[in-house]
Amino acid sequence: MRNVEVRYNSDMDQPPESAENYSPDGVDLTLIRWMLSLTPRERLDVLYSNACSLEKLRRAAAGR
Amino acid sequence: MPPPVADVGALLRALIEDGVEFVVVGGVCAVMNGAPISTLDLDIVPDRSPDNVPRLMRSLDRLEAEYRDIAGRSLAPDAELIRGAGHNLFLTRSGPLDVLGEIGRGRDFAALHARSHVVDIGDGLEIRVLDLDALIEIKREVLRDKDRATLPILERTLEERRRTD
């Protein structure tokens, strides 16, 4: 799985303005751009990995 | 106990190995088109022709598919139901698999096939996935609560793709 590249503004040593990272209706565009940078196989791997992690958390929360 | 999360790769491999003709729709289709959403199952719309249904039945048998039954009964796949337009929701040894006769307003395999593309998912496997603009159109048609939640993500994904293509 590939990691998200985080670029900082060298002048201010701060992340870019967050407004640039969201659409007007609040969708996180950084995640979309990251997913689009992956191959179809990698997208499937991300999906499976996320779903397994969520299921693990769900079971933990249920005390099983 | 079957896994509660679909091993999408294993499900697709089984269907392809049995020569089943189908279009991937739903959440996995959204992900294959680059949308950052999550889903627990694989949704497919199969060709319900006399040639293809036996292939699908063979695949479901190999996957040890049973209907997800709220009463907990053990119900094997029914070819007659699969030939219909309804939705067959299975749990398999590789997780949940939904076999849908039609989606949206009466869109069947032929209608969806015309608005789909082939995706190489590695290991020599190719699948047919519904186009993102068609998926958005269908979600607008049905507009359930869960569709309202994902529609903005799908729409922004389509915009980003068009912007960068």
Image: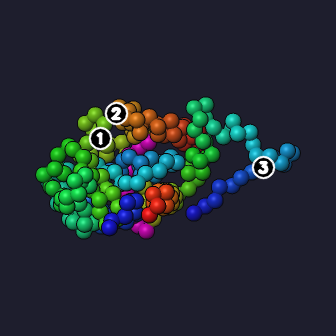
Mark 3 secondary-structure assignment: loop
Q: Quadrant of the N terminus of chain B?
A: bottom left
Q: Are marks 2 and 1 on the same chain?
A: yes
Provide the residue designation for mark 3: A8
- C-beta proximity under 8 Å, tags 3 and 2: no
Q: Nearer the viewer, residue B22 or A60?
A: A60
Q: Earlier in the sequence, mark 2 or mark 1?
A: 1
CA separation in Å, label 3 and label 2: 42 Å
- Residue type of the residue flagged with mark 3: Tyr
- Residue type of the residue flagged with mark 2: Val
Task: Residue at the far front: name it.
Answer: A63
Q: Report the coloring of the rendering.
A: rainbow
Taking the spot 59% from the left edge, 35% from the top edge, the residue there is: A26
Provide the residue span drawn in magenta.
Answer: B123-132
Q: Is residue A38 magenta?
A: no
Provide the residue designation for mark 1: B103
Q: Is residue B143 left or right of residue A53?
A: left
Taking the spot 83% from the left edge, 48% from the top edge, the residue there is: A13
Q: Which mark is residue B142?
A: 2
Q: Are marks 3 and 2 on the same chain?
A: no
- The answer for which chain carries disc 2 is B
Rendering coords of residue B101 (x, y %): 23, 46
